[in-house]
Amino acid sequence: MIALPVTSLYAGLGALLMIALAARIAPLRRRHRVGINNGGKEDLALAMRAHGNAVENLPLGLILLALLEVQGLHPATLYLLGGGLILGRLLHAWGLSQTAGISFGRFWGMLLSWISLLAMSGILIWFALPLSQTVA
């Protein structure tokens, strides 16, 4: 059995974030009496996008993190990358929950998420190259 303690931590935190974001939608649907889509209600639209954006970004990041962990990347680097992904998603969700426009949370949250995803992607590509096998 392969244990993935770092990925497990961030998968659990990511799931809690997605549940919290999803839980905000149902009361807004009831308040606005909107069953499908957002009914033109901005607060509902923002809550839906905050949840949707997490759903769009977290799974890929967790897959990349798990692949890196299986390949033996140093735990400190895994924690840094996973922490950057989760912190980025938290900041982005907070920023998007406040405004549809530009905000500190949206900008830095997306940037931090992208940096984490790009770093994980780059490391995985490096690991896949034959050259990386001879350097180690």
Image (cartoon, rainbow, N blue to C red):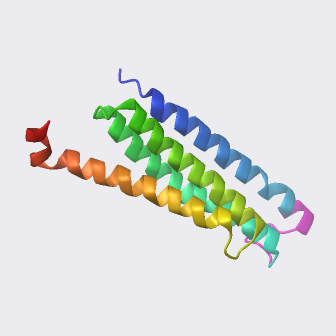
In which quadrant of the rendered view does residue 109 lie? bottom right
Q: In the rendered view, tell whether residue 23 sits above or below residue 93.
A: above
Left of 118 or right of it: where is 20?
right
Pick out the residue farthest to the right.
Answer: 31
Point 44% across, 52% down: residue: 116
Pick out the residue farthest to the top.
Answer: 1
Point 59% across, 56% down: residue: 54
Q: Which residues are magenta?
A: 29-39
Left of 63 or right of it: where is 49?
right
In the rendered image, is residue 51 in sight? no
Q: In the rendered view, tell whether residue 113 sits above or below residue 20.
A: below
Image coordinates for residue 103, horizontal then vertical, percent: 68, 69
Image coordinates for residue 94, horizontal then vertical, percent: 71, 58
Q: Is residue 25 magenta?
A: no
SS assignment for the magenta stretch, majority: loop
Q: Which residue is more in the foreground, 84 or 1? A: 84
